[in-house]
């Protein structure tokens, strides 16, 4: 899955550095067409290329992918119940969170 904001952010970052696609592709040792595909969202770069882009353009592109993954996880755990009158919704936290909370020691309030 390629986050929709990845390509435009990549293009903006490249332009801010006053580089063209050929400049970037040469530095990454890839074809200009491959780089163009990243900017247009046709494909995502491999992790090693993403790391190089992060260093070269001084922008944390990994955060875009992490935010998209977190959003997808949230929405996959979000369930609507249309049979209820108020069309309320209910969420279910990920199992890892449930197990963390249940395994945690209780916190006692501090005395003032």
Image (cartoon, rainbow, N blue to C red):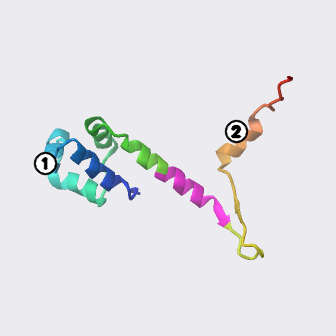
Residue annotated with mark 1: 22
Please say if the residues under marks 2 and 1 sit with CB atoms less than 8 Å apart: no
Magenta-tinted stretch: 68-79
From this view, report whether residue 96 is shown above or below residue 76.
above
The residue lying toward the viewer, choosing from 78 and 94, is: 78
Q: Position of residue 73 (x, y in %)?
A: 56, 54
Secondary structure found at label 1: helix
The residue sitting at 80% across, 31% down in the picture is 107
Q: Position of residue 98 (x, y in %)?
A: 71, 45
Q: CA distance from mark 2 to mark 1?
A: 48 Å
Q: How many marks?
A: 2
From this view, report whether residue 104 is shown above or below residue 71.
above
Secondary structure found at label 2: helix
Residue annotated with mark 2: 100
Q: Magenta includes 20? A: no
Instruction: Report whether 102 appears left or right of 2.
Output: right
Instruction: Report whether 7 appears left or right of 35.
Output: right
The residue lying toward the viewer, choosing from 95 and 87, is: 87
Question: Looking at the rendering, in which quadrant would you find the C terminus?
Answer: top right
Q: Main secondary structure of the magenta part?
A: helix
- Looking at the rendered structure, which numbered label has been put on residue 2? none
Pointer 1: residues within 10 angstroms few (<14), some, or many (20+)?
A: some
The residue sitting at 73% across, 40% down in the picture is 101
Q: Position of residue 1 (x, y in %)?
A: 41, 57
The residue sitting at 72% across, 68% down in the picture is 88
The residue sitting at 71% across, 42% down in the picture is 99
From this view, report whether residue 35 is shown above or below residue 48.
below
Q: Position of residue 81 (x, y in %)?
A: 71, 71
Instruction: Report whether 58 appears left or right of 107.
Output: left
């Amino acid at each position: 899955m390629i986050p929709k904001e990845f390509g435009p952010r990549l293009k903006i970052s490249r332009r801010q550095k006053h580089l063209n696609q050929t400049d970037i592709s040469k530095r990454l040792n890839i074809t200009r067409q491959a780089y163009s595909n990243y900017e247009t969202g046709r494909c995502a770069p491999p992790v090693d290329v993403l790391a190089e882009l992060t260093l070269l353009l001084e922008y944390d592109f990994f955060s875009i992918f992490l935010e998209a993954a977190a959003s997808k996880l949230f929405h996959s755990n979000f369930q609507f119940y249309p049979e209820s009158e108020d069309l309320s919704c209910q969420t279910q936290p990920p199992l890892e969170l449930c197990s963390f909370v249940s395994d945690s020691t209780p916190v006692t309030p501090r005395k003032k």
